[in-house]
Structures are given as structure tokens and as C-alpha cells.
């Protein structure tokens, strides 16, 4: 397979992965907006995490910011898959930033809120996988 | 065409994402509330979902399975508004709802009857069952509401404890009940059965989280539980019974 095709396939994989993160973030945003996330449920941790002060940044639900970030990842990955080189560079920077934010959020859940929300962990897992995928794309470039 | 294709894909995904969010925002409150048609004009919160709730409003309220008897009630049975709360003492939103309900009780007095039902979310909350048992054991000595109030007011203190038994025994002493009898009652079958019956009632009514509040048999949407909205709903219910 040509290097260009391999890179496009990797970016396409990143785009598909970001759709999973986007779905998760949309669900969390809707839960937040409708007030459902604030209620305690049989699922441990989510209400504690989503009703904490860390779930909102400057009046905007963090999940909504996450949804916007995943949509941007999808857009950049799609453009990169079609050969837009600048998009690839921006994508790497965005995913690294998202990964760092995810690490911070996991720290908050583990040591400050002391409760884990599985939907937030799913988002962190998707971001980690995106980082792996994007690093693979960078490796292909250096071959 | 190939140059446009990525932008078309992006726009399609954006459209699907926005439509999904819009659909979920409308469908979630409608599916979790059984608010009936109320006299008077709807509150802004209700107006938001009034269309989708029109059909549900005609539905007869589900009486549900019987809970523990006698139930823990405040206020007369003849009150025009009967509020039933399914709560979990370890749940933070329930703790936040506690002062709101106290405020409503003071405000409406004999015009409202409040019933508390145990709905400990196990295993989500590690001490929820112990707290429910403590309240029920206090109830065996006629001091349910005193223990109920203490558990909610000091929720942040005891929820992080490893062993809550000595803490709750301290509360039992504080509210002036026989601690030795409390220790026997807290692990008794009678207390376990009361919690189980309240839980069964909750499940039969479709309760999935806490706090879940019913007013005259109809569920109050979670977003309507802040004091200013709940006050309007209770007032409307009382006026409707005149």
C-alpha cells in the first residue's frame, strides 16, 4: 500500500473513532441540559461527577465543549484523509490537548470528586485511542 | 466533486449530530415524566415539553405496588396535595432537595402531606442501605423524621466514612432513642422488609433514580424540583382541589 493511502486509512480510522466520542459527548450534553445527569441513578458515580462544579466551564457544560472538540477532530481527520496536510498538523495538536485534558479529568474523578462516570471514562478511552492512531499516522510520515 | 466530498461528509455528520441532540433533548423529559394536565397556565419548564406530554397528561396515574406500612408521613391525610419522595440518604441531589422540601412543608403546612419512601441505590452508594436502615430503625421508636433530617444534613460527613455504624449510633443517641434497641432493629428483618417494600413500590412506579417525586400520583419532572418551580406546582395542585 502506498504511504499516502496508509495515512488516509489511519486518518479515516481517527474520524470513525471520533464519531464514538461525539456520540458519547452528545449523550452527556443532553443529560446535562435536561437535568437528568444531576439525579442519582443505580449507575455509580455519574451523578456525582456530572453534578460537580467541574462539569461546567464558564457556564458551558463540559460535555458540550467535548462534543465540539470531537466534531472538530472528525472534521480535521476527514480533511486529512482527503490529503489536506494542514488539517493533519492541527489534528495532532488538538488530540494532544484533548488527551491532556482527559488526564486532568481522570485525576479530578479519582482524587477530588472520588467517583467515576463510565461515560467520561469512555470519552477518555476514545481520546487515548485517538492519540495512538494519530501517532501511527505520524510514524507513517517519517518512513 | 472529490474536492467537495470531505466538506459534504462533515456537513452531513454535523446535521446528524444536531438532529440527534435536538431529538434526545425533546424525548428524554417526555419519556421520564407523567405530568398530568394541570389547571392554570403552564410554567416555562412545563411549556417546553407540553406538546409531547399532552398524551401522557390524559393517562391515569399508576397506583403502584404498596410500600411499607405505615408509611412515614408528615401532614394530614386529608391534605389536597400529597407529595411522595423516593430518596436515598447518600445521594447528593436528595441532600440538596431536603431543605427545599422542608421549606415547602413550612409554607404549605396542613395543605400538603409528605411521604418518604426508601430507595437506596445499591451498589452505587456504599452506605445508602445502612443509612436507610438507620432511618427505619429510628422510625421503630417513632423518630424517623429526626434521623431522616440528621442523615441529610450531615450527608457530607458520613458518606466518606469507612464504617458508618458508629456514626449512625451516635445520631441515634443524639435524637434520644434507645441505642441498644436501635442496634437490634437496624439489622432486623422488619427494617429490611420495609426498605424492600418501598423499593418495590418505586420500581412499580418506574422510579429509576433519586430524588423522584410524585405529586398526587403524578411524577414531577426533575427539572421542576427547585423551590420556585415546585411551589407553583404544589399551589396549582391545591387550587385544583378546591
Image (cartoon, rainbow, N blue to C red):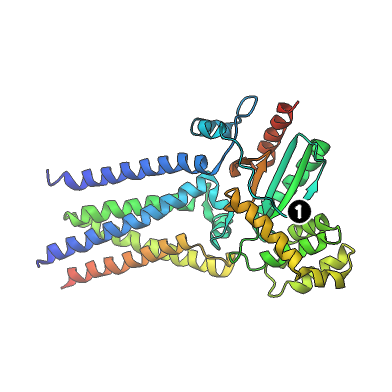
Q: B18 or B32, which is in the foreground?
A: B32
Q: Secondary structure at mark 1?
A: loop
Q: Quadrant of residue B43?
A: top right
Q: Is residue A44 above or below residue B230?
A: below
Q: At which x and y percent is residue A117?
A: 50, 62
Q: Residue at 65% x, 45% y: name it.
A: B213
Chain under numbered label 1: B
Q: At which x and y percent is residue A108?
A: 53, 65
Residue A13 visible in the picture:
yes
Residue B210 visible in the picture:
no
How many callouts does the rendering have?
1
Q: Is residue B67 above or below residue A3?
A: above
Q: At which x and y percent is residue B26?
A: 46, 39
Q: Residue at 39% x, 65% y: name it.
A: A99
Q: Quadrant of the N terminus of chain A?
A: bottom left
Question: Counting other residues with Cα less than 10 Å from the Cα at mark 1, is it few (<14), some (14-19), or many (20 or more)?
Answer: few
Instruction: Kindly identify which residue carries mark 1.
Output: B69
In this rendering, position of residue B215 left or right of residue B45 = right
Q: Quadrant of the C terminus of chain A?
A: bottom left
In this rendering, position of residue B119 left or right of residue A131 = right
Amino acid at each position: 500500500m502506498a504511504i499516502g493511502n496508509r495515512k488516509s486509512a489511519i486518518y479515516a480510522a481517527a474520524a470513525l473513532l471520533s464519531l464514538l466520542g461525539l456520540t458519547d459527548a452528545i449523550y452527556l450534553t443532553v443529560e446535562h441540559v435536561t437535568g437528568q445527569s444531576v439525579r442519582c441513578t443505580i449507575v455509580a458515580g455519574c451523578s456525582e461527577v456530572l453534578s460537580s462544579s467541574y462539569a461546567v466551564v464558564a457556564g458551558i457544560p463540559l460535555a458540550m465543549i467535548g462534543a465540539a472538540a470531537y466534531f472538530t477532530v472528525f472534521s480535521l481527520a476527514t480533511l486529512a484523509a482527503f490529503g489536506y496536510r494542514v488539517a493533519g498538523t492541527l489534528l495532532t495538536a488538538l488530540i494532544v490537548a484533548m488527551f491532556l485534558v482527559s488526564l486532568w479529568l481522570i485525576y479530578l474523578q479519582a482524587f477530588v470528586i472520588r467517583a467515576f462516570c463510565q461515560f467520561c471514562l469512555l470519552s477518555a478511552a476514545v481520546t487515548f485511542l485517538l492519540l495512538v492512531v494519530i501517532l501511527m499516522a505520524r510514524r507513517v510520515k517519517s518512513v | 466533486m472529490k474536492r467537495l466530498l470531505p466538506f459534504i461528509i462533515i456537513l452531513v455528520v454535523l446535521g446528524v449530530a444536531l438532529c440527534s441532540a435536538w431529538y434526545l433533548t425533546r424525548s428524554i423529559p417526555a419519556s421520564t415524566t407523567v405530568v398530568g394536565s394541570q389547571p392554570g397556565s403552564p410554567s416555562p419548564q412545563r411549556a417546553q415539553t407540553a406538546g409531547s406530554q399532552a398524551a401522557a397528561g390524559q393517562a391515569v396515574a399508576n397506583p403502584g405496588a404498596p410500600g411499607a406500612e405505615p408509611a412515614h408521613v408528615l401532614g394530614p391525610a386529608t391534605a389536597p396535595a400529597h407529595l411522595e419522595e423516593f430518596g436515598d440518604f447518600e445521594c447528593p441531589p436528595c441532600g440538596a432537595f431536603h431543605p427545599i422540601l422542608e421549606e415547602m412543608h413550612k409554607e404549605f403546612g396542613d395543605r400538603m402531606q409528605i411521604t418518604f419512601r426508601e430507595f437506596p441505590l445499591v451498589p452505587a452508594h456504599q452506605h445508602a442501605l445502612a443509612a436507610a436502615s438507620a432511618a427505619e430503625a429510628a422510625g421503630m421508636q417513632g423518630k424517623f423524621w429526626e434521623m431522616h433530617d440528621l442523615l441529610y444534613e450531615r450527608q457530607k460527613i458520613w458518606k466518606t466514612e469507612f464504617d458508618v455504624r458508629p456514626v449512625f449510633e451516635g445520631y441515634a443517641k443524639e435524637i434520644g432513642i434507645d441505642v441498644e434497641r436501635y442496634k437490634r432493629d437496624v439489622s432486623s428483618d422488619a427494617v429490611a422488609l420495609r426498605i424492600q417494600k418501598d423499593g418495590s413500590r418505586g420500581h412499580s412506579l418506574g422510579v429509576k433514580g433519586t430524588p423522584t417525586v410524585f405529586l398526587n400520583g403524578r411524577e414531577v419532572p426533575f427539572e421542576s424540583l427547585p423551590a420556585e418551580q415546585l411551589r407553583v406546582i404544589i399551589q396549582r395542585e391545591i387550587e385544583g382541589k378546591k
